[in-house]
Image (cartoon, rainbow, N blue to C red):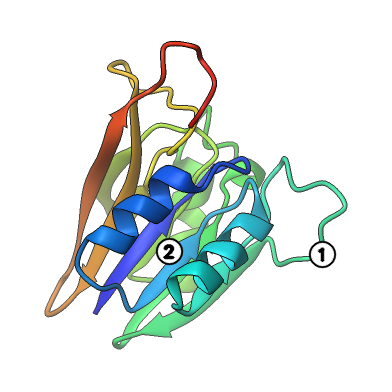
Amino acid sequence: MRIALVSDTHGQLHAVQQTLATGDAIDLLLHAGDHYADGLKLGQILRVNVKAVTGNCDLMVAGPEEEIFRARDRRILLTHGHLFRVKRTYHPLIRRAVELAVDVVVFGHTHLPIIFQEQGILFINPGSPTRSTAADGRRTIAILTLKQAPRATIVPLGPQPLSGKPD
């Protein structure tokens, strides 16, 4: 199973849409918030099932703050991350993941792509396809592959435009 991971799109979908439409097929799209509606729209455009959560910029938007579900016998937690203060520390998010006994956590909020393992749990922040905080300015998404063991890869979309305006 191949799952596209996206977060912090902030209304800019072109680069994500182009990358996912021209790459290998995906079975599911996970959108980790900031802009919840973007995940739903991408799902319609790409004709793929979507799970999405709200983030700190999704004010007055009716949507879940957290999704816990199974995909290929793996328990996955999808959250934006702001409620766990991920810009300061990962400890509250790690505690929540352990409490829920999940195998994979997908989160956003920091706009910084990162993949790490802690206590046997795979944590993935796909970064942002629009407003990167990566040192090299990379705009990114990620791909999660669920086979025998979950594996994730960061997918660069290219440098942030010089104007500072996304796409």
Q: Where is residue 110? Give x, y as percent.
A: 50, 33
For badge 2, the amino acid type reads Val
**Is residue 48 in sight in this rendering?**
yes
Contact (Cβ within 8 Å) of mark 1 with mark 2? no
Q: Earlier in the sequence, mark 1 or mark 2?
A: 1
Q: Nearer the viewer, residue 126 or 40?
A: 40
Taking the spot 67% from the left edge, 48% from the top edge, the residue there is 55
Q: Secondary structure at mark 1?
A: loop
Taking the spot 54% from the left edge, 21% from the top edge, the residue there is 165
For badge 1, the amino acid type reads Ala
| Label 1 Cα neighbours within 10 Å, binned few <14 / some 14-19 / many ≥20 | few
**Is residue 121 in sight in this rendering?**
no
Q: Where is residue 138? Give x, y as percent.
A: 31, 27
In the picture, measured across the screen, residue 1 lies left or right of residue 3, that is left
Q: Where is residue 15? Give x, y as percent.
A: 40, 43
Quadrant in the picture for the N terminus: bottom left
Quadrant of the rendered image containing residue 23 = bottom left
Q: Where is residue 44? Give x, y as percent.
A: 55, 73
Q: According to the image, label 1 marks what residue?
A: 62
Q: Nearer the viewer, residue 33 or 42?
A: 42
